[in-house]
C-alpha cells in the first residue's frame, strides 16, 4: 500500500463498493452531467449539423466540476466546438457555454437553448 491510496473501511455498514473511506466521506464525489432534456437539445442541433455534413463525431466527458460535449469534424482531430455545463458558474455568468477550438467563448448563459442558438446556420459558418 502506498501513501496516496485511500484507507478503505470494511465495517458492517460499508465496504469498498459503497465508497466509505477512513477520512469519513459517506459517498464518492458527485459528477456533473447533462440531464435527458439538455442532452436532447444538444443532440437535436448535432443531428442537424451531421445531416448537413458539417460535423461527424462527438464525445461526452463528465467530471466533478463540469460536463463537456465535444464536437469533431473528424474523430482524429481536436474538437471543433465544446458545449460545457459548469454548475459553479450558474449564478454568475450562466452554467452553459459554447467554446470554439481556439478557446474563445462564443456564447454563455443560463438557458441552454439560447446558448445553442449560436450554432445555427445563419450565425456560424465554416470558412474554407
Image: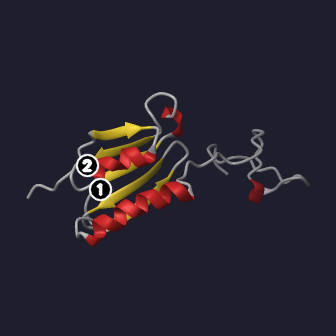
The answer to whether residue 82 is visible is yes
Q: Which residue is mark 1?
A: 79
Q: Answer above or below: position of 48 versus 35.
A: below
Q: Residue at x 28, y 72 (%)?
A: 51
Residue 21 rendering spot, x and y as whole percentages: 76, 46
User: Element under label 2?
Assistant: loop
Residue closer to the observer: 125 or 8: 125
Indicate left or right for 61 with 51 as reference.
right
Q: Residue at x 69, y 46 (%)?
A: 6
Indicate left or right for 52 with 5 as reference.
left
User: Any mark on residue 110, and which?
Assistant: none
Tags 2 and 1 touching, CB below 8 Å: yes
Q: Answer above or below: position of 23 versus 19.
A: above
Q: Quadrant of the C terminus?
A: bottom left
Residue 24, located in which quarter of the rendered image? top right
User: Element under label 1?
Assistant: loop
Q: Answer above or below: position of 72 versus 14.
A: below
Q: Earlier in the sequence, mark 2 or mark 1?
A: 1
Residue 89 rendering spot, x and y as whole percentages: 48, 33
Residue 10 rendering spot, x and y as whole percentages: 84, 54
Q: Few, some or many C-alpha atoms within 10 Å of disc 2 (few <14, some 14-19, many ≥20)?
A: some
User: Any mark on residue 101, and which?
Assistant: 2
Q: Residue at x 38, y 50 (%)?
A: 83
Amino acid at each position: 500500500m502506498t501513501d496516496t491510496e485511500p484507507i478503505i473501511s470494511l465495517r458492517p455498514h460499508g465496504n469498498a463498493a459503497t465508497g466509505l473511506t477512513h477520512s469519513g466521506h459517506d459517498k464518492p464525489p458527485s459528477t456533473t452531467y447533462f440531464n435527458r432534456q439538455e442532452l436532447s437539445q444538444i443532440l437535436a442541433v448535432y443531428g442537424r449539423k451531421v445531416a448537413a455534413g458539417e460535423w461527424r463525431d462527438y464525445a461526452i466527458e463528465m467530471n466533478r466540476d463540469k460536463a463537456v460535449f465535444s464536437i469533431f469534424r473528424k474523430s482524429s482531430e481536436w474538437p471543433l466546438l465544446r458545449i460545457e455545463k459548469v454548475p459553479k458558474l450558474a449564478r454568475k455568468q450562466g452554467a452553459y457555454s459554447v467554446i470554439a477550438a481556439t478557446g474563445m467563448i462564443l456564447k454563455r448563459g443560463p438557458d441552454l437553448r439560447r446558448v445553442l442558438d449560436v450554432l445555427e446556420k445563419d450565425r456560424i459558418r465554416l470558412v474554407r
